[in-house]
Image (tube, rainbow, N blue to C red):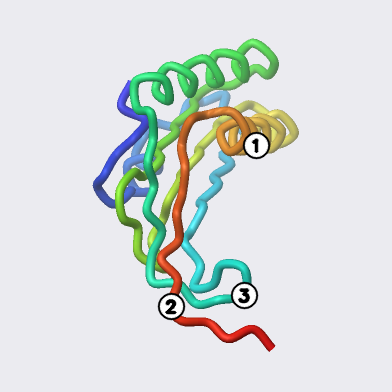
């Protein structure tokens, strides 16, 4: 499984996966830590997960996506631990014969991960004055 990592996410790992002759679409979602949260500057996000359950749930979500859409490849990596501003927190890559399936499956996967998988983020905010 190994969907969770405390190392920086290497997008070239997904790009290096062999593209099949029937792959007509490759969709990639990158969730990147932005410099603000709730209007206040942050330095990083801390991600925590109930790792055994999160790994199993991500595996099940991939299987659900493959049952619903004719996917040719799926890759998911999610950071845990401290993730600085500007770094990738999550990668979802999907390959399919057609873009409709690839986009729909990618959207399903990121939405389900954010809603259902036991991964929590805590921003480290800098002092903030709201006007």
Label 2: element kind: loop
Q: Nearer the viewer, residue 75 or 34?
A: 34
Q: Report the residue at 56% width, 33% height from top.
A: 113
**Alpha carbon of mark 1 to alpha carbon of mark 2: how far?**
28 Å
Q: Are marks 1 and 2 in contact (CB under 8 Å)?
A: no
- Name the spot of residue 28 as percent of width and height, x first: 54, 45
**Alpha carbon of mark 1 to alpha carbon of mark 3: how far?**
23 Å
Q: Nearer the viewer, mark 1 or mark 3?
A: 3
Q: Residues within 10 Å of mark 2 (few under 14, many from 20)?
A: few
Residue where numbered disc 1 is placed: 111
- Name the spot of residue 94 as percent of width and height, x first: 55, 33
Q: Report the residue at 51% width, 53% height from top.
A: 31
Residue where numbered disc 2 is placed: 126
The quarter of the picture where residue 17 lies is top left
- Name the spot of residue 65 as percent of width and height, x first: 62, 20
Q: Are marks 1 and 3 in contact (CB under 8 Å)?
A: no
Q: Report the residue at 62% width, 75% height from top.
A: 39
Query: Is 124 rendered above or below residue 111?
Result: below
Q: Nearer the viewer, mark 1 or mark 2?
A: 2
Q: Report the residue at 57% width, 24% height from top.
A: 22
Image quarter in which the N terminus is found: top left
Q: Which mark is residue 39?
A: 3
Image quarter in which the C terminus is found: bottom right
Q: Which is more N-terminal, label 3 or label 2?
A: 3
């Amino acid at each position: 499984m190994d969907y969770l990592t405390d190392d920086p996410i290497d997008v070239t790992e997904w790009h290096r996966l062999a593209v099949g002759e029937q792959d007509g679409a490759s969709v990639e979602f990158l969730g990147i830590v932005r410099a603000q949260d709730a209007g206040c500057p942050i330095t990083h996000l801390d991600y925590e997960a109930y790792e055994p359950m999160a790994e199993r749930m991500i595996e099940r979500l991939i299987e659900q996506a493959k049952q619903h859409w004719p996917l040719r490849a799926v890759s998911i990596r999610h950071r845990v631990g401290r993730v600085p501003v500007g770094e990738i927190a999550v990668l979802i890559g999907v390959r399919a014969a057609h873009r409709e399936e690839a986009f729909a499956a990618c959207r399903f996967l990121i939405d389900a991960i954010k809603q259902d998988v036991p991964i929590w983020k805590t921003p480290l905010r800098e002092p903030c004055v709201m006007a």
